[in-house]
Amino acid sequence: MTVTEENVRSFLLERLEPHLRQAGLEPAALSDETDLFTAGVIDSLAIVELVSVVSDRYGIDDWEDYDPEDLLVIGPFCRYVARRAVTDTQIAG
Amino acid sequence: MTVHDARADAANPRNLPTGEAAFDHLAAGFVRSARELPHRPALAIGARSWSYEELLLAAAAIGETLKKHTAVRAPALTAIFAHRSFSAFAGVLGALLRGHGYVPLNRKFPVPRSKEMFDRSGCRALVVDTDSVPQLHELLADAADGVVVVAPELDDVRKLQRCLTRHVVIGRQSLERAGKPELEPPESDVAYLLFTSGSTGRPKGVLVAHSNAAPFARGMAERYGVGPEDRCSQTFDLTFDLSVFDLFVAWERGACVHCLPEKTLVKPGRYLREHELTLWFSVPSTAMFLQRFGMLKPGSYPSLRWSLFCGEALPVGVAEAWAAAAPRSIVENLYGPTEATIACTVYRWEGERSRDESRRGVVPIGHPLPGMSALVVDDELREVTEGHEGELLMAGPQVALGALDDPERTRTAFVVPPGQERRHYRTGDRVEFGPNGVLHYVGRLDHQVQVHGHRVELGEIESAIRDAIGATEVVALGWPVSDSGVGGIVAFLGGEDAVDVARLRSDLAVRLPEYMLPREVHVLPHLPLNPNGKFDRRALQARLEPA
């Protein structure tokens, strides 16, 4: 089973839907370069919550080599998760 | 208390080590280190670093410029409108070398909030970095003519001067040339003026003296045996008083201050390892973040000698994980309100013994630091006996001068309890006075919460919401609640037909810093009341608990 960047992106946008709605942002308006932290869409706690959920779902046990500057830029984040993913609990059941 | 009469009220004098200036000055340790170790690194931001000599010369140029342009009669305060930049640190030192206290402002706060702080401080001078310049026009909108704006990074100030026609703008080219300064007694006893969240809806100013902060920095440098080889973390924004520890404890002994970039603070593991930091100081939240990133594995941070936490409760699990991740370091939990100068009690983590001694999953706050004393009292300010809970009062040389222009708050918060002789600060924190005098943090006596170490009065948020939409039924809660504090703010509104939540959030964002903005807003037909006729906060919190 391969996790693609697209899989991660749709999961990410679904998870962040309430944050985007509160910030008045349409998912369609987001690009690869959108920085959700700098744009004030999510705070550091929300990033950490997201990282926990994503780690569990995709079996990532550490984020050692993830560049903090990419927190939380949509494209690099999704690519990183897709590259590191060893499973997808939602699909593997 | 005003800045003008602070001088007369300052608690002094004290025993100074020989060879030290005959007066307390927060920058004295830095100046001495710069004289003795001019070529050692004093400051690193990202990939760049500056020696003591470079930082001293930059600070002295700002100090001389302020001296030339600021009158003696104005409040002896200079605002620092700069964030995690060289000018921020040179500005703090420059203001202190001028003999002024500094007033940190933060461009991450809404401008109206910074403006209120600036206006209330009465500052007539300000140091600004390039990234904060866009907010200056609004910040100075109501200031009387002639504010001295020092912009040490700007070569060409013509554009800024055209925008600030009523004020005096001084750029890099016009800074005074300064040699190595001799430290003079400060013009003001105030070393810094910080604003904290206020329950009445306005930030509260706290005046901290050189005689409070300078001995603290000396004492902590001594306690941690800081030396020129140390590399110390700088995690706290200047608007948070724990930043005073970050800077002045390291500079006291010639160590290097490592300012972590904004995003790195969410995930500082790699920075910590690559720069081989020796002293770490942050809120426990940062450690919890690293835990979630899977980056508190045993042995991860062998360079650390000291791991210090402050600003919110330290959960036992975090202390244990950190102690294993930094096995050569000693973990200490510090506690203290701004009014008792940075930190006033400390507890050393010692594995199993500490695990047994901890209560409710939280590490004790320990014992008062040398020179400070703690008193745990009941409602009538009478001391309680061991094993009981009460409000924590602190006395000693770190108790601050008072609240800015708020005699009522100064009178009620700084008290001499019955049977005592010294002035005590009422922390508003409920603690348990445990066996052997160990203090355990229990909670707040009022509606104050800690959001990642930031002190937040829920009343201030409620008042902002009422102002924004005219609602009467408003409750703000800290949520989610963890062992260390709360993750953020959730608001409940009642009695409103239709609330435009996105609009409310953007209205609030103009007034409140990000960590005070509600992460969720729940609209109910009416808010529940408790038997006393007050909003039932417990019932509302229960609605947030998972079913």
Image (tube, coloured by chain):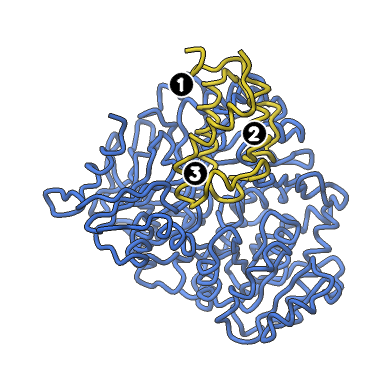
Chain colours: A yellow, B blue
Image point (67%, 86%), residue name: B166
Is residue B418 visible in the rendered image? The answer is no
Q: Residue furthest left?
A: B531
Subunit of label 2: A
Report the residue marked by disc 2. A77
Image point (47%, 44%), residue name: A19
**Residue B124 screen position, x and y as percent:** 62, 79
Q: Earlier along the polypeptide chain: callout 1 or callout 3?
A: 1
Say what amino acid the circle numbered 1 marks: Arg
Report the residue marked by disc 1. B353
**Is disc 3 placed on a helix, strand or loop?**
loop
Label 2 or label 1, whichever lies nearer to me, is 2
Q: Using a 10 Å C-alpha cutoff, classify the residue at mark 2 as few (fewer than 14 neighbours), some (14 to 19) or many (20 or more).
A: many
Tag 3–tag 2 contact (CB < 8 Å):
no
- Taking B418 as reference, is B139 left or right? right
Image point (53%, 76%), residue name: B119
**Residue B444 screen position, x and y as percent:** 34, 47
Is residue B476 visible in the rendered image? The answer is yes
Subunit of label 3: B
**Residue B256 screen position, x and y as percent:** 76, 45
Say what amino acid the circle numbered 3 marks: His
Quarter of the image where the C terminus of chain B is located: top left
Choose between B522 and B229: the one closer to the eye: B522
Quadrant assignment, res B167: bottom right
- Taking B115 as reference, is B181 left or right? right
Residue B102 disc label? none
Report the residue marked by disc 3. B452
Above or below residue A77? Residue B343 is below
Choose between B17 and B318: the one closer to the eye: B318
Quadrant assignment, res B131: bottom right
**Residue A82 screen position, x and y as percent:** 64, 24
Say what amino acid the circle numbered 2 marks: Phe
